[in-house]
Amino acid sequence: MHSAVAHHFESLEKQAEAQRLGMWLFLATEILLFTALFAAYGVYRFLYTAAFSEASRGLETWLGGVNTLILVTSSFTVAMGLDAATRGRTRRTAGLLGLSILLGAVFLALKAFEYHHHFAHGELPGRYYTGPIAGSGGALFFTLYFLITGLHAIHVLIGMTVLAVVAVRCWRGAYDAEYHVPVELAGLYWHLVDLIWIFVFPLVYLI
Amino acid sequence: MSPLPAGDPPVYAARNYLNTPATGLRSWLTTLDHKRIGVMFLVATLVAFALGGVFALLIRIELLTPGPTIMDAMTYNRIFTLHGVVMIFLFMIPAIPSGFGNFLLPIMLGARDVAFPRLNLLSFYLYLAGAAIALWGMIHGGADTGWTFYTPYSTTTTTKVVPILLGAFVVGFSSILTGLNFIVTTHTLRAPGITWSKLPLFVWSIYATSVIQILATPVLGMTLLLVAIEHAFGWGIFDPARGGDPVLFQHFFWFYSHPAVYIMILPAMAVMSEVVCAFSRKNIFGYKAVAYSSLGIAFVGFFTWGHHLFTSGQSPYDAGVFGVLTMFVGIFTAIKIFNWVATLYRGSISFKTPFLYFLGFLFFLFFGGMTGVALATVSLDVHWQDTYFVVAHFHFIMVGSTIMAFLAALHYWWPKLTGRLYSERWGLVGAVLIISGFVFTFLPQFLLGNEGMPRRYFAYPARYQALNVASSAGASVLAIGFSVVLVYLLVALRHGPVAGSNPWGSRGYEWETSSPPPLENFEVVPAFERGPHEYHDLPAAAPGAGEGRHA
């Protein structure tokens, strides 16, 4: 039997099935974590429609757009990496995961640049807000903006760490064509991080 | 390995999970064995229960007289908050799923362990870490918001609400990981022969609980985090002074916390479905109805949170819809009650301690459930809102039922956990004290609430005193009952007679292995031909007939 099978599983396939199911359930909890924030965003957008659309128009849509492209590309390279792993070419996987991490870092750098821009214009959450929009709406928009994009950025960081660990193990030859479930799971997590952004981008920047 | 033939002396398994691979503290703290983790959860939650119980007694002592008795108003606010936080987050939510669930679920599936043993241990340490953070907050000032942390009060109070929120947040992740582990284990680690229609009903209910745990807890985590951020930095999200909506908090909070009461009651139902079969020696009546009604409760439970907001400015239309949806829970619960009672019909009932708790459970579930249906009626709720009627209702259904089930489980599986039997005579004394103490504590509170006494006040008009004294007297009976149970169980731990693998003559899969079970649960991978609740092919001998032959 394969050395990666834990004693309480009958086979590698059964263990992989358990790990995949576990990951999907974990992703469900992640989605619900964000759902609370999305719901709050929806409620306040309804309560402060004018202020929210004004604040939203003030964001740099092109930056958000570029970041969306970057994350989607990084998901593509992760998928390529998994494909390479299924063929047993784990060095290639390590390289592709490294590229994804790099793209994640570019995403974060652009996000940091955007944050810096907000800070300079007093666009801060809650009581720190000194931006141009009168009333509570603008401040609340940036509260939710920082909560949502901040939590997402934390997830990007975690995802990069997970990818890095898996990439190193790939490079060292820990996985092969038969056993590469960790690559798959790390990939799933990264796709989720990407997918959440796909919802964040239109919600915060476009509508 | 059906029940031991008469005359065969029961055996204490020499090689068991308590002494393999080692017995030292270190081997426990680093264990990946689900049974040990379950036992550690049980011990930890019992410590929390004792702490919450002390807070409860302080509340009842304070309410003996209309004015100040032993503390000032601010201290009282802190005490009832801590009582709620400790009992709910540290005892009732984890006790049965994380404690008994961990111990039993893999054995009932014929598995060697849960799917992710390391995650399981992490879950225990997250629980400890969360409890430690909350405890730190309690020692350094506590909180005075009530366990519901309603905004905007919770975001402006000067008490230490942030560490308590963070503690609950961390404990939530423990709950999520345990639920995730159980679902994956149930799907992937069933032994040959255990199909979904042959799953023990305990597993069905714990599975339904796990679904709620993983779907609802993240929302609570986020909500508590938002309150902590609001309290610490003033980001305005729930603060009406900054345009925020405090009612939104209530929606978020109850989106978790209403399903959370089913996290408490479903495991209780899980235990009772096992106990009722074992002590009436009957096949369960309506296996599928009992199994699916657990899933039904888990599902409908997500759409009832609005009944906590009847008086918070919800539209009458919403209130009506939430009221009706709430009553659906009553239907699923009634399905279970009817099936349990039908199981008893013409059964060979033996009134052992777990069965006594089953009777107490039926009473509390039925009484508490009916008052719940009454409270779900909007026009009545407006009258009872925030009175002791609500307090008595949720103590009956949530606390009463859960504690009955917890004690039933503790007694029913005690021989499996420890390999020894407790004293049935003292078991009877303890059960009578606890059940009657519970009724005497909370029945007066229904009357108080109906007369209009509001909850969460440390003083009250003199005309309420008689009933308050009655309630406090009941609480002291309850305290004595719990002490009795604690003492005889501790005595049984060392001096109890050897139980043998199946002292009850139960058909549950977990009784097929020795007591205490070996590290790997079963010596060989078991294959089960029959269902876990099938008694029809057995002679109707009284369970526990072999007990006491061998002191």
Image (cartoon, rainbow, N blue to C red):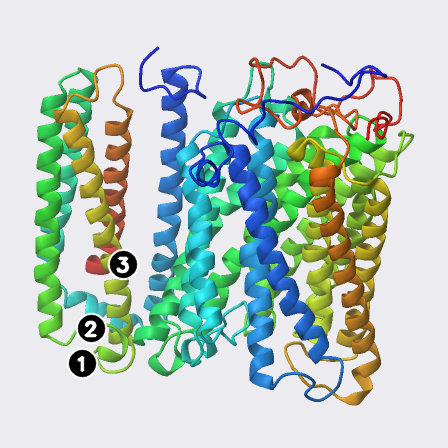
Tell me where residue B261 appears, x and y as whole percent: 61, 54
Question: Looking at the image, is mark 2 or mark 3 earlier in the sequence?
Answer: 2
The quarter of the image holding the N terminus of chain B is top right
Q: Amino acid at mark 3?
A: Ile
CB within 8 Å, label 2 to label 1: yes
Have a look at marks 1 and 3 and say if they share a chain. yes
Judging from the image, what secondary structure is the residue with disc 1 in? loop
Residue receiving disc 1: A130
State how far apart marks 2 and 1 are (Cα): 7 Å
Question: What is the number of callouts on the image?
Answer: 3
Q: Nearer the viewer, residue A138 or B358?
A: B358
Q: Is residue B508 left or right of residue B439?
A: left
Badge 1: chain ID? A
Judging from the image, what secondary structure is the residue with disc 3 in? helix
The tag on residue A148 is 3
Question: Looking at the image, is mark 2 or mark 1 earlier in the sequence?
Answer: 2
Badge 3: chain ID? A
Look at the picture and state if A133 lies above or below B364. Answer: below
